[in-house]
Amino acid sequence: MRKGETTKLAILDEASEIASAVGLHGLTIGTLAAKTELSKSGLFAHFQSKESLQIEVLRHARNRFVDVVIRPALATPRGEPRVRELFEGWLGWFRGDILSGGCLFTAAAAELDDQPGPVREFLVSDERDLTDTVVQIFRTGISEGHFRQEADPYQFAQDVLGVLLAYTHTYRLLKDPGAEDRARRAFEALLTAAR
Amino acid sequence: MRKGETTKLAILDEASEIASAVGLHGLTIGTLAAKTELSKSGLFAHFQSKESLQIEVLRHARNRFVDVVIRPALATPRGEPRVRELFEGWLGWFRGDILSGGCLFTAAAAELDDQPGPVREFLVSDERDLTDTVVQIFRTGISEGHFRQEADPYQFAQDVLGVLLAYTHTYRLLKDPGAEDRARRAFEALLTAAR
């Protein structure tokens, strides 16, 4: 990897961390310059605009998400074990194991849901890909005979997202220590219903 | 009501609408002045700071939420009918029936979860009150014999919030027309588990 690319990845790591805490709108060339101790003009050489910075941060965070959540799930035996691995990794992502501010995509979704433009389009396309991946992983449970033939993978994808979103609200905002146990019980109830 | 109070309520209606679309951070005295055609100095007479404006908007939106979601539920017979009425009203709130940008509190939660200060404290206290209300409404279902004695009201409160958060993600961000049907099915599954 060339030195320029290494530097850029280090900047994007820092930028993802900032955005996970304060949202995409709070991520500016200025705050990033202060954190990375790089000059604003140096940062402008990497990112031509705030919008391109936001898109690159979303792409970078998604790459990390794929590495720490999706790949380990796909490396696990098909069916229920794979669905469980997906849930565990995803829960850790929401808990803040990777980016300390928790799920950057959730913060970005709340910011962007009524704001048309290329950043929203990028996020939506990415989140649709994620739904497809969850659906595909769930389907391995049907074809392996772990889940019922008529179980609806799109219902499962929406339901499991709900478990994680309610977890992050209850844990990160309300600081309720029971949030994670409740999320696990809700996930077990989804599996029971699917079997 | 004095004229000053009527004016202030009209301003808060507009401010809640703006914040539901662009988040609390997007609500400034400047954007509010443009929308209401009032002068910035006139607005400063009502709200001394951006922070006090944000808190008053959250309080105003919560009053509307209580009027359109909580009161109709409490006016419905105790037990499962009351829980259903709560869900229907809350779903409408998320759908954007009241504020066109959807749930202002969800947007604010994503913005504020890592940002300590009086606005976050206000939101957290308010959301804890909401959890208590959901728990209390669910408990009427236990005492009326509609739900099992050992059903956990806090589990239900977190689960039903998840159903609504996943609905808003899938409907408002991804524009998936199946989101509402799935939310209803998920809610029915929660009731079935509670019975």
Image (cartoon, coloured by chain):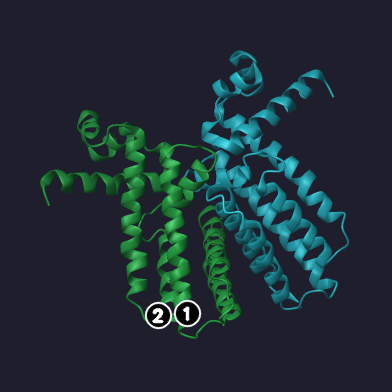
Chain colours: A green, B cyan
- Can see residue B191? yes
The percent position of residue A131, horizontal first and vertical second, equals 47, 61
**Can you tell which mark lies on residue B6?**
none
Name the amino acid type tagged 1. Answer: Gly
In this rendering, the count of numbered labels is: 2
Contact, mark 2 vs mark 1 (Cβ under 8 Å): yes
Q: Name the residue carrying label 2.
A: A78
- Res B77 quadrant in image: bottom right
Determine whether, in the image, residue B113 is placed left or right of residue B163. Answer: left
**Above/below status of B120 relative to B13:** below
Residue at the image point whose x is 30% and y is 37% from the top: A32
**Above/below status of A102 relative to A191:** above
Between B130 and B26, the one lying in front of the other is: B26
Sequence order check: which comes first, mark 2 or mark 1? 2
Between B149 and A49, the one lying in front of the other is: A49
Q: Chain of mark 1?
A: A
Residue at the image point whose x is 29% and y is 46% from the top: A14
The percent position of residue A180, horizontal first and vertical second, equals 52, 67
Q: Name the residue carrying label 1.
A: A141
Name the amino acid type tagged 2. Answer: Arg
Residue at the image point whose x is 61% and y is 32% from the top: B18
- Distance (Cα) linking label 2 and label 1: 7 Å
Q: Secondary structure at mark 2?
A: loop
